[in-house]
């Protein structure tokens, strides 16, 4: 029994839809999501993968079908039928991609706005340019020399989400990029490190700056990347939701050793993070006997050798006897 073409088309459409939905949600192309914001970005990426997979199967399936069905038959030396423009078909294959692109644009903008990015409908660049207290992300095209001096403090990047507008982040970290390292300073505790240690479950604000050239703060597991520009302040806000170690690298070609500008973001539980803070504060205190490691350049020879001499059972009397016997 021949299946009517409409039913065949319907069945093919159902199969393509199911394949697209399955692959779009099981592609495995993204690294693990370590922040609340990453899940929203993944939703957008999965949606685009579903659409792209459907279009790929339709186009490639049509090509393969036509290559076999309309192939040259044996003994057939005639020309193919003359075809001219098909206006309804051209309108259809123009309107559908255009509608998809517009819908993805609106969806991606909404995701970016939800994360705390620029929203000209509620913030506006002009308002932000004359309001240094604004922390909304903003794309600035005006030359720096034409802007007021205080406008140079405009925050770029991803700021507070609409639900957290006007609220300070629970933890702030100042991040400085320089050829070829990242320096992390914690204003609340005065700690300075070369690795970024953060607690999960708290909203973090990273204040980005650069000392020399443009760098880019990028942690793939956060789905966030932001340029650090000399003379400008940029920020990122996010909330970690998974304990672990994640690579933190510069994503902007910044010089000959750009590839070596990589460190780690270490996400702790709140308890482990407090232990780390306390250990760093103890280590940074001068003349602290509880420190596990001190800078040896700040110690005299006797101070540096004292713990080793005590461990070996050498005291002052023994050293004196050795000195006399040697002479």
Image (spheres, helix red, strand yellow):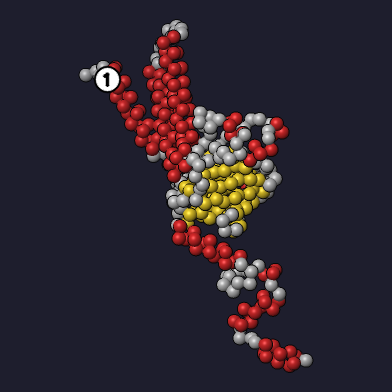
Mark 1 crowdedness (10 Å alpha carbons): few <14, some 14-19, many ≥20: few
Extreme residue toward the left, this view: 1
Q: Residue at x 60, y 45 (%)?
A: 208
Q: Which residue is mark 1?
A: 7
Extreme residue toward the right, this view: 327
Q: Quadrant of residue 225?
A: top right
For the C terminus, the quadrant is bottom right
Q: Position of residue 271 (x, y in %)?
A: 45, 60
Front-lying residue, 37 or 324: 37
Q: Quadrant of residue 103?
A: top left
Q: Position of residue 107 (x, y in %)?
A: 45, 30
Residue 109 drawn above or below residue 157? above
Front-lying residue, 42 or 208: 208
Residue 290 drawn above or below residue 62? below
Front-lying residue, 110 or 48: 110
Q: Position of residue 10 (x, y in %)?
A: 30, 22
For the N terminus, the quadrant is top left
Q: Residue at x 64, y 30 (%)?
A: 141
Q: How many marks?
A: 1
Label 1 residue SS: helix
Q: Is residue 65 left or right of residue 307?
A: left
Residue 121 drawn above or below residue 77? below
Q: Is residue 253 visible?
A: no
Q: Is residue 311 left or right of residue 165?
A: right
Front-lying residue, 52 or 264: 264
């Amino acid at each position: 029994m021949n299946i009517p073409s409409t039913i065949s088309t319907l069945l093919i459409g159902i199969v393509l839809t199911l394949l697209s939905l399955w692959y779009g949600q099981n592609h495995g192309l993204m690294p693990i999501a370590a922040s609340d914001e990453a899940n929203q970005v993944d939703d957008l990426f999965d949606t685009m993968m579903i659409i792209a997979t459907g279009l790929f199967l339709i186009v490639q399936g049509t090509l393969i079908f036509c290559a076999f069905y309309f192939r040259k038959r044996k003994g057939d030396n005639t020309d193919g039928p003359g075809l001219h423009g098909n206006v309804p078909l051209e309108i259809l294959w123009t309107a559908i991609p255009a509608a998809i692109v517009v819908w993805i644009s609106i969806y991606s903008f909404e995701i970016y706005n939800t994360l705390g990015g620029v929203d000209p409908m509620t913030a506006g660049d002009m308002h932000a340019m004359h309001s240094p207290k604004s922390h909304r992300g903003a794309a600035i095209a005006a030359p720096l020399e034409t802007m007021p001096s205080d406008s140079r403090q405009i925050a770029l990047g991803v700021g507070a989400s609409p639900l957290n507008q006007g609220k300070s982040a629970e933890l702030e970290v100042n991040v400085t990029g320089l050829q070829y390292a990242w320096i992390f300073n914690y204003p609340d505790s005065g700690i300075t490190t070369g690795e970024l240690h953060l607690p999960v479950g708290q909203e973090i604000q990273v204040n980005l700056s650069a000392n020399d050239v443009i760098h880019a703060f990028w942690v793939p597991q956060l789905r966030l990347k932001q340029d650090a520009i000399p003379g400008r302040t940029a920020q990122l806000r996010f909330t970690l939701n998974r304990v672990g170690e994640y690579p933190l690298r510069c994503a902007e070609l910044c010089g000959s050793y750009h590839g070596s500008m990589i460190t780690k973001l270490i996400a702790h539980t709140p308890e482990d993070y407090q232990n780390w803070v306390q250990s760093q504060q103890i280590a940074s205190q001068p003349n602290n006997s509880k420190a596990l490691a001190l800078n040896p350049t700040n110690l005299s020879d006797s101070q540096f050798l004292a713990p080793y001499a005590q461990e070996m059972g050498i005291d002052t009397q023994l050293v004196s006897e050795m000195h006399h016997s040697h002479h």
